[in-house]
Image (tube, grey):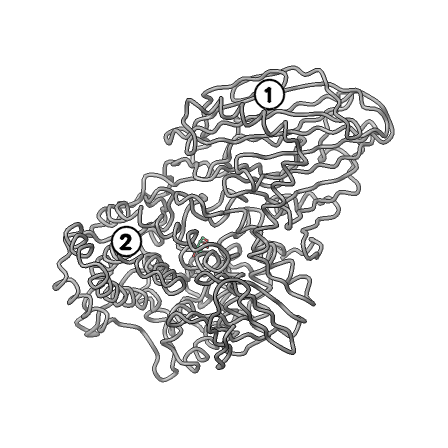
């Protein structure tokens, strides 16, 4: 854990330059706009420790799988989010000396991310080895108003000299991924051109052949007045730049505005990329930094109006929730059903930038509650479009008859994860995709989704479960062997309670979906039966048998659901007995030691109770929470939010608050010592759930909205809005009262605590 960022309600602030924290800050201060994004690396050259990262949504490279020991069934590749051509660099030299903060004396360094308007600012005073001092003020944003546009204003003031400034403004496609399996560069040059007022490079990804066209132009100013310079151009392999010199005058501020466009062949015809880039470059330069910024800022303000959560009396908590919402909104805007939410968004390479079960299990409720229903629907349709690939994926592993196994990690529907205990065994992900459909319909009431897309997906998933279980003559139950549950600190276990539960539930829900669709649209049902060769009678009879006879390990004496067979054979210890030096376990202990221990990465029994809470009593929840919570190390970012929600139900206010800080400030305070790899974007939706479902107690049951709010002792009040079936509902909770009203849309019956109210 590292706490060096200042607390502020709307800003993330780093004061003073500590190179050892630089990679963490590069992640935390990342900016994006749903189409592209980047780590907060410096504009000028930096020879110290840094992790360059610019990313373009949907653009990936299938990096050939590299494993120590090949296993049949492994995917051929891992889809990597690509470090894309960079537009942010501004190379600065003064009288021949390169500005490089690793070699200069740095004072008054401040990095600030204004979350209200998405502006990243960095200011500092640098003394170069020659003694020349300059003040720099660098501002940049990725426009929320136009996802293909970015801009930088880089202002330099010489403090104790006048002298020659030399500037290079490149587009640099000669970039690499740190996680490349074979140290290979993933981009080839297709086109480049540079002249005195613009530079463009088109780079193509090897194998996938995406084209990304990155273009820049610029404007220079002296004390805010346009001051043209004489520019030249420079090109080399995968690189095009504009260069110029300027005579700096002591105490006169010179600023460079660098405008950029990033266009991808996902959205433009390849042969029209250059002309589209040129046109856009002209128009954004005419628009100018300030007007572009106004449009960007207005877009952010609108988004915040719907999604903001305010917390009074606890600045760390307030900053935490806004940081999480900000990151989610700049990662996925929901207007393109080909895109999804990578666990690191635009903040790092780890996890390949692809889609995980995180989307359905954690992110969906956030987008349902804060934006138009279409956004969440797009996320479901994304999986519908991947159904054939999920069927092929299952077929590769020996499943038949249209059984679908959705991938653990994917970009285009194909599995690209390659650790056998996860690829082949962490199959609970299939259940989350079914649950996502259920969750969407429960919230929106749009049952028709089942007819249009949902049922087909559910049949594929149910077919998989039906083949994945086997009958145990010994137990006289269906069992599921060789799986990994959400708790990845156990592998290859038998009868993971959560996986068995969600499998049985899917079979039940699929039956309900069949019953619905048959009545809703008989013709559509019959068409589907034909399309997927569905033998309803036989298949549903089998599913019914499985779900009523599924083995769910438990210890009935203690009233515990057992994470898996044999869990109680472990030495049952609690996390408070662990030495500080042993944490995080995944960085300190050998893997076998982790597997043998009772310590839990994320508690999957509790995940199951959270998903299906209406099936469990308060006492069930309490017994299981009291047993599993003390063993949970929360080394999955997805873990703490579920504990906030359950602790809130149990009235464990302190635990709920502790877990809330952990989820909301996970990256700001680097709890798991891994923020330098990027931020944990998908778990940020869990932070939102912590407030809305946890403290606010929001639930939807039978089409009705319920709240059961409480307020942590540390807070004076909090408020949030949710969109629900055409309404916007505002919830205000203070120590003295709870006020819930519909602020737009028709009146609605809302149940608060046990009371029904018309809001
Ligand atoms: C978690 C998985 C999750 C992945 C991506 C892992 O550490 O254990 O459940 O899907 O991170 O967020």
**Residue furthest front as drawn:** 746
Q: Is residue 92 above or below residue 659?
A: above
Label 1 crowd bin: few (<14), some (14–19), many (20+), radius 10 Å: many
Q: Which residue is mark 1?
A: 198
Does the beta carbon at disc 1 come under 8 Å from ligand 1? no
Which residue is located at x 25 percent, y 63 percent? 513
Q: Quadrant of the N terminus?
A: bottom right
N-term-proximal mark, 1 vs 2: 1
Q: Is residue 120 above or below residue 221?
A: below
Determine the secondary structure under disc 2.
helix
Residue 11 shown left or right of residue 393 in the figure: right
Determine the secondary structure under disc 1.
strand
Q: Nearer the viewer, residue 561 or 437?
A: 437
User: Is residue 49 in view?
Assistant: no
Q: Which residue is mark 2?
A: 452
Q: Which x, y percent locates residue 80?
A: 43, 39
Q: Which x, y percent locates residue 724?
A: 46, 63
Residue 435 shown left or right of residue 629 in the figure: left
Q: Nearer the viewer, residue 720 or 675?
A: 720
């Amino acid at each position: 854990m590292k706490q060096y960022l200042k607390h502020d309600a709307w800003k993330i602030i780093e004061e003073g330059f500590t190179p050892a924290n630089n990679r963490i800050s590069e992640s935390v201060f990342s900016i994006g706009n749903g189409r592209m994004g980047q780590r907060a690396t410096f504009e000028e050259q930096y020879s110290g420790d840094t992790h360059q990262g610019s990313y373009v949504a949907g653009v990936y490279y299938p990096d050939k799988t590299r494993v120590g020991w090949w296993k049949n069934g492994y995917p051929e590749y891992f889809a990597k989010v690509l470090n894309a051509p960079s537009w942010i660099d501004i190379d600065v030299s003064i009288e021949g000396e390169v500005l490089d903060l690793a070699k200069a004396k740095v004072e008054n360094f401040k990095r600030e991310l204004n979350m209200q308007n998405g502006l990243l600012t960095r200011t500092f005073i640098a003394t170069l080895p020659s003694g020349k001092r300059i003040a720099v003020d660098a501002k940049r944003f990725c426009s929320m108003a136009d996802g293909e546009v970015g801009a930088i204003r880089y202002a330099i003031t010489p403090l104790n000299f006048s002298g020659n400034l030399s500037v290079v403004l490149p587009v640099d496609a000669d970039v690499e991924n740190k996680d490349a399996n074979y140290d290979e560069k993933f981009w080839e040059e297709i086109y480049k051109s540079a002249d005195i007022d613009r530079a463009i490079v088109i780079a193509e990804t090897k194998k996938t052949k995406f084209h990304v066209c990155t273009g820049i132009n610029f404007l220079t100013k002296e004390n805010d007045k346009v001051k043209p310079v004489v520019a030249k151009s420079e090109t080399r392999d995968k690189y095009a730049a504009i260069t110029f010199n300027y005579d700096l005058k002591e105490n006169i501020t010179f600023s460079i505005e660098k405008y950029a466009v990033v266009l991808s062949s996902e959205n433009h015809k390849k042969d029209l990329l250059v002309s589209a880039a040129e046109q856009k470059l002209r128009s954004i330069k005419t628009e100018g930094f300030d007007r572009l910024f106004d449009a960007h800022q207005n877009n952010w303000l609108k988004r915040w109006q719907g999604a903001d959560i305010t917390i009074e009396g606890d600045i760390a908590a307030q900053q935490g929730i806004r940081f999480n919402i900000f990151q989610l909104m700049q990662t996925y805007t929901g207007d393109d059903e080909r895109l999804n939410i990578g666990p690191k968004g635009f903040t790092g390479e780890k996890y390949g930038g692809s889609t995980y079960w995180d989307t359905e299990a954690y992110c969906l409720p956030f987008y349902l509650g804060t934006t138009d229903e279409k956004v969440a629907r797009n996320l479901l349709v994304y999986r519908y479009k991947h159904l054939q690939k999920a069927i092929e994926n299952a077929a590769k592993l020996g499943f038949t008859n249209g059984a679908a196994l959705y991938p653990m990690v994917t970009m285009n529907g194909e599995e690209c994860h390659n650790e056998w205990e996860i690829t082949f065994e962490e199959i609970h992900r299939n259940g989350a995709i079914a649950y996502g459909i259920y969750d969407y319909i429960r919230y929106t009431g749009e049952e028709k989704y089942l007819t249009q897309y949902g049922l087909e997906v559910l049949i594929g998933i149910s077919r998989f479960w039906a083949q994945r279980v086997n009958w145990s003559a010994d137990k006289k139950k269906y069992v599921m062997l060789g799986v990994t549950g959400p708790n990845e600190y156990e592998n290859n276990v038998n009868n993971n309670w959560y996986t068995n539960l969600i499998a049985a539930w899917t079979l039940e829900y699929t039956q309900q979906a069949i019953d619905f669709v048959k009545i809703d649209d008989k013709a559509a049902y019959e068409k589907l039966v034909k399309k997927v060769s569905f033998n309803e009678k036989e298949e549903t009879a089998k599913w019914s048998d499985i779900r009523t006879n599924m083995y769910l390990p438990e210890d009935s004496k203690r009233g515990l659901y057992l994470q898996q067979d044999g869990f109680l054979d472990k030495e049952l210890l609690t996390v408070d007995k662990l030495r500080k030096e042993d944490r995080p376990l995944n960085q300190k202990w050998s893997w076998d030691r982790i597997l043998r221990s009772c310590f839990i990465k994320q508690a999957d029994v509790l995940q199951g109770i959270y998903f299906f809470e209406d099936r469990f009593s308060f006492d069930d929840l309490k017994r299981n929470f009291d047993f599993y919570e003390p063993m949970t190390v929360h080394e999955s970012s997805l873990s703490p939010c579920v504990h906030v929600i359950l602790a809130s139900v149990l009235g464990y206010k302190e635990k709920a608050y502790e877990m809330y800080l952990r989820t909301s400030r996970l990256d700001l305070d680097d709890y798991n010592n891994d923020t330098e790899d990027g931020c944990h974007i998908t778990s940020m939706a869990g932070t939102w759930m912590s407030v809305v479902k946890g403290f606010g107690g929001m639930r939807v049951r039978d089409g009705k909205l319920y709240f059961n709010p409480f307020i942590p002792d540390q807070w004076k009040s909090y408020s949030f809005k949710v969109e629900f079936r055409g309404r916007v509902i505002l919830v205000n909770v203070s120590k003295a009262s709870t006020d819930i009203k519909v602020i737009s849309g028709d009146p609605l019956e809302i149940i608060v605590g046990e009371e029904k109210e018309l809001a």
